[in-house]
Amino acid sequence: MKNAAVICEYNPFHNGHAYQLSYMRKKLGVENIIAVMSGNFVQRGEPAVFDKFIRTEMALNSGADLVIEIPAVFSSASAREFARAGVKTVLSTGVADMLCFGAEGGLDSEDLDSMLRLIKSGVYDDPCFNASVREALKTGASYPKAVSESLLKLSGHDVGGRAEFTDWPVFYNDLSSRLVNAVTLPNNILAAEYLRALAAEEAAGSGKLEVHAISRTDAGYNSQDIPAGGEIYASATALRSIMASAADTDMRNTLSCFIPESAAELYDSHKLMDTAVFPDDMSQILSLRLLDAKKNHKDLTAFCDVSRDIADRLLNQADTICGFEARAKSIKTRQYTLSRIKRALMHICLDITKEDFEKRKAGGYVSYIRLLGFKKSAAEKGLLKQLKNNSAVPVITKAADYKELLKEDIYCDQIYYSLKNVKGEYERSPVIV
């Protein structure tokens, strides 16, 4: 029995996601698909547009057999920590044989091998390489561009900068500029982090997974373009843009072109377009946190991703009436990406401190598996029983029985549900389809 996992957000679930699950089943011969999915907050530093149970149901209706939650402390973290938590969760299940993920730029199996060699060479941990990345960031380059420039220098494509690198393996000379640029596309940054996490786990003797990259069918992870002319694939970024204009009936009709029919039915039955959650819904919570910090002289640097510079800028404008998105843009400097700023703001809102984060990491990232939903067939085929028997950590099917263990996650969820004045669902049993 081949069991494959996919680390995902499904924010929101769309035709591209359905294609990926179908590809795993039909092309890779996967029997069971385990989706390890972000909960109510996502890696871009935003609340998920729909809650985790709705997104779970969409995934199960479109091909997943079982959905497991990535807690907010890691689902809202950097790409590296998000990937590490996801990979550790997959390995902790004790039942997954394979990890699949989306890729951009025509990344193939040979490219994956090259990426893995690059990672195992230790480049991402090398002080000289990281110093080059930091210098590029200071000039205003985005993180992907900073990594790309440093890798190009490393591989000899920029002769002028090559002198700063010494004693590099000959392998680096073979890196093509095409591969370097492909590695630094948004989806492929995550792919590299998955490979990096897997390499670390394999070296530690914690397990090994077969990996497969599945080419994206849309314009790309961050593409805001809304396709026309009969296209059925659009990025999640584009779909969220459509939802933000949901008052427009034509935009609602446009959305239906890019989501599976089974998902569209949930949009109607749950009135999702009227209850969708967006970053600016966090505005009042953030303003309150900042006013409290200023009044009571609290140190904002205690929160994850909040540097001294970010903290000072936030406190200086604490009295300013400002939305979440506008505040993030107002304190952005070329030293930080907008996503980094939004993650910092989200961690303030959710009270996720560096100390708490490090404790979760020190505990191995994964101290339990929270089951969000599964298909009846997964139970009938024995997948659920295998999970409970083979998991390295407790498998939670009812949060109410583990309130103390889940208290941080419950706190974050209650904040999420308060945004739309909806009763929290932390005692809800898993979705069964």
Image: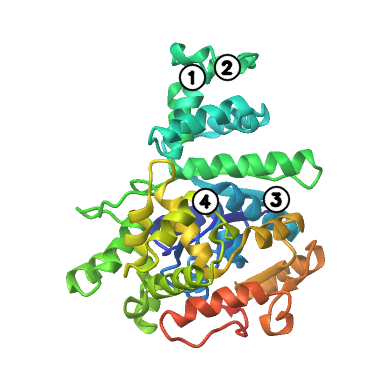
Image location of residue 139, percent across then percent down: 39, 32
How dense is the environment of label 1, judged by Cα within 10 Å: few (below 14), some, or many (20 and up)?
many
Left or right side of 93 for 220? left
Residue on which the image places disc 3: 97
Image location of residue 345, percent across then percent down: 46, 61
Q: CA distance from mark 4 to mark 3?
A: 43 Å
Given contact means CB atoms under 8 Å apart, are the residues at marks 2 and 1 in contact?
Answer: yes
Marked residue nearer the N-terminal end (3 or 1): 3
The amino acid sitting under disc 3 is Asp
Q: CA distance from mark 2 to mark 1?
A: 8 Å
The amino acid sitting under disc 2 is Phe
Identify the residue shown where x is 59% and y is 46%: 80
The answer to which quarter of the image holds residue 127 is top right
Q: Is residue 396 above or below residue 259?
A: below
Residue on which the image places disc 1: 153
Marked residue nearer the N-terminal end (4 or 1): 1
The answer to which quarter of the image holds residue 367 is bottom right
Q: Nearer the viewer, mark 2 or mark 4?
A: 4
Q: Which residue is nearer to you in this view: 285 or 185?
A: 285
Left or right side of 30 for 44? left
- The answer to whether one can see residue 29 in this image is no
